[in-house]
Image: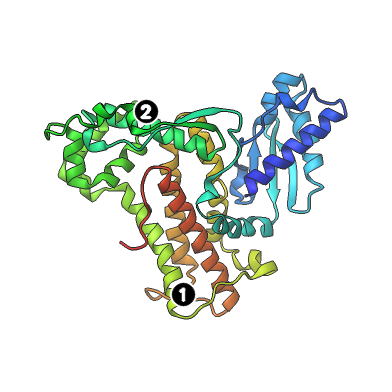
Amino acid sequence: MITGDLDTELARSLTSLAADGWLPAESQFAPGGTWRPGPGGDAAAYSTSVTFEIARLSGKSPTDLAAALASSLRALAWIDSAESTGEGYLTVTVTPQALAQSAVRMAAAGASCASSSILRGSTALVTPWPDLAAATGWEQAWRDQADTMTGRLAQAAGATVTITSEWERGRDRSRRARDGSSPVQAAVAYLGASSVRYRLARTLPGNVLQLEQLSQASARDTDPLYVVQQAHAEAASNLRWAADLDIEPRDPGDRLASLLDTRSEQALLGLLSFLPVRVAAAARRRRPDEVPRYLEDVSAAWMACRQTSPALPFGGHAAPADPDRVAARLLLAEAVRVVLAAGLALTGITASDRL
């Protein structure tokens, strides 16, 4: 994926600078997973603050480091520009074709599209998904979900994991609260296990008290999981309808970038490319809530894209006449479907193709 490619080239550039004696041994630096959206809203722009950490360790200035790294990265054919920005950040803009092809690569990767080697060398514990209906209260339910999810995120990001069984975790805890006295058990009975699990997953540390609202009738009307499941189902339905219309999947090749050129398509492409980084960052920071919120951003971007740049006719929206543009938009729909399914799996939820 693009962020992984950028990590590889950044590490290579650091190695080269160290070999030339301009930097200390590159083994001191860990640039992986530091990319964020670039300034100015360009979907193809990626920035990193790793230069500030390297500057602290090497004695170089962040601005000089960013300039040196940018000079090396500019030689790559798939990088459109690279420069020092904002007092020492390194900002790289990839070519339109590289950005568009990232969707093809993510779709082809399937469930592994969330995987990376960003946390390679670290360790994590992977436990079974907790039985939420057995939790004695919201604090326990949130902690069990956060601990399990953080381990799964770290595993996806390349950490070395120890996998424990339910027995090792403590089977006696799974037998608690079966008398109907737990508010979590009541919420699971009312809203469903997936809905409760997702709300636990997206709850920020320290905000557990807000989960008490799930006992209210209005909780059914404001289900954040539905938004993500709906977007996944909409993406899947595009592919299903295309098959019904005998539209064969195909890669438009070199035309792909020019076919996915609307503002909504570009924004969606940029957002999709950050899945592995978001997963690794959520694990590193022990903030699993960042992944569901990322999925909600992808869902909103996809629904906007579907309205403005549909692949197939629906609700009065005309489909493009160019078969290659139809194929390109279906490729984008497949990338969205794959990313949302992979993200939901990391929260312990199975994506639905139909609602």
Residue 163: percent from left, percent from top = 45, 33
Work out which residue is located at the far right of the displayed protein and give it: 20
Residue 46: percent from left, percent from top = 64, 43
Q: Count all numbered tags in the image, as a single digit.
A: 2
> Could you tell me which quadrant the C terminus lies in?
bottom left
Q: Are marks 2 and 1 in contact (CB under 8 Å)?
A: no
Q: Disc 2 marks which residue?
A: 205
- 329 vs 189, left or right, is right
- Dot 2: few (<14), some (14–19), or many (≥20) neighbours within 10 Å? few
Comparing marks 2 and 1, which lies closer to the viewer?
A: 1
On the question of residue 209 being in view, the answer is: no
Amino acid, disc 1 = Ala
- 235 vs 121, left or right, is left
x 33%, y 33%: residue: 166
x 64%, y 39%: residue: 47
- 126 vs 3, left or right, is left
* Secondary structure found at label 2: loop
Amino acid, disc 2 = Pro
Q: Disc 1 marks which residue?
A: 242
Q: Nearer the viewer, residue 107 or 178?
A: 178
Task: Place residue 321 in its image quadrant.
Answer: bottom right
